[in-house]
Image: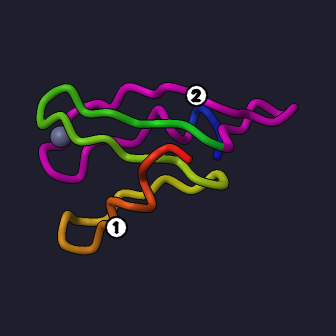
Amino acid sequence: MKLNTIAKLCCPFDKQDLQLKTLAQDLDQNVIEGILSCKTCLRNYPIIYGVPIMAPDEYRQIALEQPR
Ligand SMILES: [Zn+2]
């Protein structure tokens, strides 16, 4: 996922801006793994294989979001 695409994302719950912590990126500056975090509701949204996981709480699988 490209950095300028990520910059447009906001928290699905309160529409606040998200802070990105990049854990891995490729040569084109695409974020492969990272954490998006919302300072308002303190939710974290992982980016896994370039895809941000922003499912509502009831669909989240917390075990998959933990560091390996
Ligand atoms: Zn939020």
The reply, left or right, for residue 24 in relation to residue 45 is right
Residue 24 pos. (x, y %):
69, 33
Instruction: Work out whether mark 2 precedes mark 1 in sequence or the reverse, and give the earlier one.
Output: 2
Residue displayed at 61% across by 32% down: 3
Looking at this view, is 68 or 15 the one in front? 68
Q: Is residue 60 above or below residue 27?
A: below
Residue displayed at 34% across by 67% down: 61
Q: Which mark is residue 61?
A: 1
Q: Amino acid at mark 1?
A: Gln
The reply, left or right, for residue 21 in relation to residue 18 is right
Q: Is residue 59 above or below residue 24?
A: below
Question: Element type at marker 2?
Answer: strand
| Picture quadrant of residue 22 | top right
| Picture quadrant of residue 19 | top left
Residue displayed at 49% across by 53% down: 52
Q: Is 26 contained in the magenta span?
A: yes
Question: Element type at marker 1?
Answer: loop
Q: Which residue is mark 2?
A: 22
Residue 60 pos. (x, y %):
30, 67
Q: Is 12 contained in the magenta span?
A: yes
Q: Amino acid at mark 2?
A: Thr
- Location of ligand 1 given as a quarter of the image: top left
The region drawn magenta spans 5-32
